[in-house]
Image: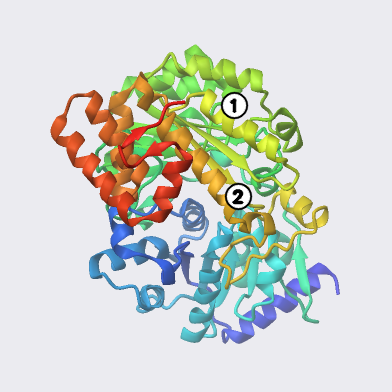
């Protein structure tokens, strides 16, 4: 049976199951990344769990609304709604189920689209599909997102999944619904997977990516855009701005010019960058600023500064507007694209934080992971960034690659300290779906890697299940970000104090090293009252925690005298 015949069979089966009813109501759901059984409500309420609005669904809703105005659309971010309920009631039992029932009741959709961007959400995605079919087995259940694009065969083994959409689905989703409703032929459908007549997975190849600059603006009116800051946080807004203001995200481009082996962007979004014009981006910023009261924006671009002229045009337009707006580039910016003009424009336009992906401090590892960066460029650009103290710089590093030696790992720890960024986050490598590195880990290293309901997205790799390895990474993070943090050592004590207090007040009240460092800062500032307060707190934490005593010994912090041993 050819693909057109398979599509006809698929439509016949779907339409028959629905009693020949057309698709008139579409419900788009964001699968939560929350681990409900482990969720600590009081802790998460204090920290404000990081929860980004479902940007892909906002675009999907906007395109469907434009192309099929007669279809009623509803978007529900189940991650946000779960946080809202748990924070207001203090209860987490059956939260996902109750939020889903609330979304279904009264709307009674004909089709439900479930977005699973991250592998960690697939367990919840499957639960949602099962509950939707339980509510009404006639509802068409669709999956989409990064995880689904690369794990579609696994998803289609679930009897509750009717179809999976590949890659960016703005066009294919709309075409599929028109096809089901008899408004277009089967040759208009592309980029989907489903079970064919003989029960085998049928793939209709993805044809082309949408022109990003011609898509309508995201349907922010279909989401609680102005309320996200009440229950979640993005990026570094809390320690950069110290204001609790309406927040939003913007994507100004799709794709990336780099070919990093550990990243899925090029495999998901295509080999080339597709950018929105500065005018198009500013139109969305104007909308968010005036209609939703947004005062903080995080750009989620993977290669924001690939075109310096475009960056400067965006910044100049923002400078002219004189908005009371802070924005950040926490998803990353390529170091090689930075120069004095770009940095000064970023600062002038209100950008206060950038993240830079360094990944490794070893040249051979950088080559193996195809990172377009040299150590020479790294040190050159780090020195340049130090000239601009108003710009907060986060460095991202990765250790634990399957082909990485202990010596190469130590290079990364050393370089993370030497570049002297405001923050250097070292993560443990985890092979993600859709990446070339995942294929390497499976095929070359023979690693057992699963993305299922029980392990909830954890990768089962022996090397990562070694406590000594975890301790090494954690201790180096403590050393780099606290004990040897350049701001703590005198470059900017005010910034160090703000960062460390944020750790204590929002993330971990009993973080002994943060408490210790705060006590030492107050000692330097000759604030005797606060110095005594945090010194006593440090002693209390140490007294009750063998783990913290262990970490302090590794860092040469003497908890008997609350001072760092020299030598």
Q: Is residue 211 above or below residue 73?
A: above
First in sequence, mark 2 or 1: give its number: 1
The residue most toward the left is 529
Q: Quadrant of the N terminus?
A: bottom right
Q: Nearer the viewer, residue 406 or 130?
A: 406
Determine which quarter of the picture holds residue 193.
bottom right
Q: Is residue 185 left or right of residue 534?
A: right
Looking at the image, which residue is at 47% across and 35% down?
Answer: 479
Q: Is residue 288 visible?
A: no
Residue at horizontal 41 percent and vertical 41 percent from the top: 235
Residue occupying image coordinates x 53% and y 23%: 419
**CA distance separating discs 2 and 1:** 36 Å
Position in image of residue 120 (x %, y %): 55, 61
- Viewer-side residue, 416 vs 145: 416
Q: Residue at x 49, y 39 (%)?
A: 477
Choose top left, top right, bottom left or bottom right for residue 144: bottom right
Residue 306's label in the rendered image is 1
Q: Residues within 10 Å of mark 2 (few under 14, many from 20)?
A: few
Q: Nearer the viewer, mark 2 or mark 1?
A: 2
Q: Which residue is mark 2?
A: 469
């Amino acid at each position: 049976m050819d693909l057109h015949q398979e599509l006809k069979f698929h439509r016949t089966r779907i339409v028959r199951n629905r009693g020949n009813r057309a698709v008139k109501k579409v419900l788009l759901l964001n699968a939560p990344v929350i681990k409900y059984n482990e969720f600590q409500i009081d802790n998460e309420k204090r920290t404000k769990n990081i929860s980004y609005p479902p940007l892909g669904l906002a675009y999907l809703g906007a395109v469907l609304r434009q192309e099929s105005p007669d279809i009623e659309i509803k978007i529900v971010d189940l991650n946000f709604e779960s946080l809202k309920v748990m924070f207001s009631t203090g209860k987490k039992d059956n939260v996902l189920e109750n939020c889903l029932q609330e979304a279904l009741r009264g709307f009674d959709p004909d089709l439900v689209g479930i977005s699973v961007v991250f592998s960690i959400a697939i367990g919840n995605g499957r639960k949602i599909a099962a509950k939707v079919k339980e509510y009404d087995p006639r509802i068409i259940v669709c999956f989409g997102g990064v995880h689904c694009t690369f794990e579609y065969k696994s998803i289609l083994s679930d009897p509750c999944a009717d179809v999976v959409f590949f890659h960016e689905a703005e066009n294919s989703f709309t075409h599929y619904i028109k096809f089901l409703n008899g408004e277009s032929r089967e040759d208009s459908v592309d980029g989907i997977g489903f079970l064919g007549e003989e029960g085998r997975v049928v793939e209709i190849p993805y044809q082309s990516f949408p022109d990003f600059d011609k898509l309508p603006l995201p349907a922010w009116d279909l989401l609680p855009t102005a309320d996200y800051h009440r229950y979640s946080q993005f990026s570094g807004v809390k320690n950069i701005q110290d204001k609790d203001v309406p927040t939003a995200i913007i994507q100004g481009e799709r794709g990336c010019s780099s070919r990093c082996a550990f990243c899925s962007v090029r495999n998901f979004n295509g080999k080339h960058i597709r950018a929105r014009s500065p005018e198009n981006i500013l139109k969305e910023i104007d909308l968010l600023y005036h209609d939703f009261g947004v005062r903080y924006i995080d750009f989620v671009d993977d290669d924001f500064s690939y075109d310096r002229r475009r960056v400067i045009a965006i910044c100049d337009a923002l400078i002219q507007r004189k908005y009371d707006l802070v924005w950040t580039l926490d998803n990353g910016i390529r170091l090689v694209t930075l120069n004095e003009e770009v940095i000064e424009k970023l600062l002038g336009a209100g950008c206060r934080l950038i993240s830079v992906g360094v990944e490794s401090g070893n040249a051979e590892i950088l080559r193996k992971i195809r990172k377009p960066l040299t150590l020479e460029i790294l040190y050159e650009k780090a020195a340049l960034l130090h000239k601009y103290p108003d710009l907060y710089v986060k460095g991202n590093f990765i250790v634990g690659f399957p082909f990485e030696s202990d010596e190469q790992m130590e290079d990364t720890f050393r370089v993370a300290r030497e570049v002297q960024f405001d923050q250097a986050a070292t993560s443990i490598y985890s092979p993600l779906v859709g990446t070339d590195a995942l294929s390497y880990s499976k095929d070359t290293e023979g690693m057992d890697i699963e993305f299922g309901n029980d392990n909830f997205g954890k990768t089962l790799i022996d090397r990562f299940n070694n406590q000594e390895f975890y301790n090494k990474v954690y201790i180096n993070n403590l050393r780099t970000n606290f004990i040897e943090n350049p701001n703590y050592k005198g470059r900017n004590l005010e910034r160090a104090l703000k960062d460390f207090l944020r750790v204590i007040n929002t993330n971990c009240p009993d973080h002994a090293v943060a408490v210790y460092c705060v006590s030492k800062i107050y000692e330097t500032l000759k604030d005797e009252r606060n110095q005594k307060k945090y010194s006593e707190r440090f002693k209390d934490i140490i007294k009750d925690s063998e783990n913290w005593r262990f970490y302090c010994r590794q860092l040469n912090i003497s908890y008997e005298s609350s001072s760092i041993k020299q030598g």
